[in-house]
Image (spheres, grey):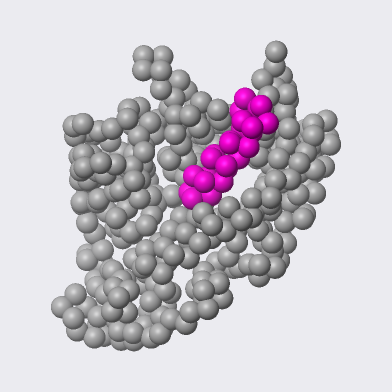
């Protein structure tokens, strides 16, 4: 009896080719597009979103081409609760969120998987560039980097649990983007040359400040730019408009370049400093999820990355209480940003990850 799979289809080329490959491998496959919000609610045009009417139509046409059913699931309430509200609240606390991670955590790999199980499907599948393996010695499922390291998406999937990994398929893990587009063209898929969607799909033109002001009704007052010793060096235009490491747009007249070092939301102060003040070797990480084991009992040498496009850096990971670790990097890391993810690697495999404190 063939296995039943739900493929999450955004209307883009990656998820479309994922569905095509699963068909070829003999899975009983159904395409699902997630309706995550109404364009009018977030104030952006169709072409800028990842779940617009155009995208839904593209997914429907691909499914018709493949001869599989297509349905739309409306998860807009859940998306607002777990992704948009989290995004807003994290910025209001002076931290920098990663909404793609929260979408994966709550929507694609929890709520969608729960729905799939209710419908008696064996797996969900996505167009992410990565793969899974089961460790024969431990029986645990591992997340492995993509063959194409320029497209690897393991950074935004570190939170996957053993249950989720065991019921998820990633057909594109061993392919390059070029190969995916070639397969789409050879198969006559309408979206073979369609552009990839933007990272923060619900924020118009990346203007998260206006988005948060419109959503919350709050206006962010001007405040002080200060050096570490408390010296005022300028006036900022609202603390929400700045992130750690930022130099551009500060508008500070000073003898040398200054960068955002930290933010004090309570006192509405942005601390700025020289380039060397951005670097640190010690990073605390909370809400950690591990893949090869349940918990860390002793120090471990790993590589870690603190931003999606950042290169991995060697460090030692120390246990620091329940679901928390300390990373001691061999070399200082620039602009460590609270709210972003730290993801741990051992060679080609994800050890785990968590949120930077």
Q: Nearer the viewer, residue 347 or 124?
A: 124
Q: Is residue 104 magenta?
A: yes
Above or below, comparing residue 306 to residue 137 in the picture: below
- Where residue 289 appears, as percent x and y from the top left, is 36, 38
The quarter of the picture where residue 210 lies is bottom right
Query: From what the image shows, is residue 311 above or below residue 43?
Result: above
The answer to whether 194 appears left or right of 299 in the picture is: right
Q: Is residue 357 visible?
A: yes
Q: Quadrant of the N terminus?
A: top right
Q: From the viewer's perspective, tell me whether residue 310 is left or right of residue 207.
A: left
**Residue at 38% of width from left, 76% of height from top?**
239
Image coords of residue 286 (percent x, y): 30, 48
Q: Which span of residues is magenta-colored? A: 101-124
- What percent of the width, then of the height, locates residue 263? 30, 71
> Residue shown at 44%/25% (left/top)?
141
Could you say which is closer to the camera, residue 124 or residue 61? Answer: 124
Point out residue 197 in the picture as x, y percentages from the top left corner: 63, 53
In the image, residue 172 sits, relative to residue 337, either above or below, namely above
| Residue at 77% across, 54% down | 54
Q: Is residue 253 visible?
A: no
Q: Is residue 8 magenta-colored?
A: no
């Amino acid at each position: 009896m063939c296995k039943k799979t739900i493929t999450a289809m955004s209307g883009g080329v990656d998820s479309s080719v994922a569905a095509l490959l699963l068909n070829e491998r003999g899975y009983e496959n159904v395409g699902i597009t997630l309706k995550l919000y109404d364009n009018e609610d977030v104030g952006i045009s169709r072409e800028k979103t990842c779940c617009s009417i155009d995208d839904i139509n593209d997914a429907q046409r691909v499914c018709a081409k493949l001869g599989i059913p297509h349905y739309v699931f409306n998860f807009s309430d859940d998306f607002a609760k777990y992704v948009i509200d989290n995004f807003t609240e994290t910025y209001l606390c002076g931290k920098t969120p990663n909404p793609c991670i929260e979408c994966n955590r709550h929507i694609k790999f929890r709520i969608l998987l729960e729905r799939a199980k209710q419908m008696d499907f064996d797996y969900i599948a996505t167009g992410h560039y990565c793969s899974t393996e089961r460790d024969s010695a431990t029986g645990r499922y591992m997340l492995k980097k993509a063959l194409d390291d320029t497209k690897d998406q393991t950074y935004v999937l570190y939170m996957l649990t053993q249950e989720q990994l065991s019921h998820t398929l990633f057909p594109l893990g061993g392919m390059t983007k070029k190969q995916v587009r070639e397969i789409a063209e050879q198969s006559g898929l309408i979206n073979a040359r369609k552009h990839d969607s933007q990272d923060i799909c619900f924020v118009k033109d990346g203007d998260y400040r206006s988005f948060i002001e419109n959503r919350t009704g709050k206006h962010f007052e001007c405040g002080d730019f200060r050096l570490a010793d408390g010296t005022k060096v300028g006036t900022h235009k609202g603390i929400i408009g700045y992130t750690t490491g930022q130099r551009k747009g500060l508008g500070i007249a000073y003898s040398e370049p200054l960068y955002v070092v930290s933010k004090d939301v309570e006192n509405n102060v942005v601390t700025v400093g020289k380039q060397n003040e951005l670097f640190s070797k010690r990073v605390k990480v909370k809400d950690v999820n591990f893949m090869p084991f349940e918990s860390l009992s002793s120090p471990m040498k790993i590589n870690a990355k603190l931003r999606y496009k950042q290169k991995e850096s060697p460090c030692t990971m120390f246990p620091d209480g329940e679901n928390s670790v300390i990373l001691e990097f061999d070399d200082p890391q620039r602009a460590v940003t609270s709210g972003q993810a730290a993801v741990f690697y051992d060679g080609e495999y994800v050890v785990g990850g968590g949120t930077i404190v």
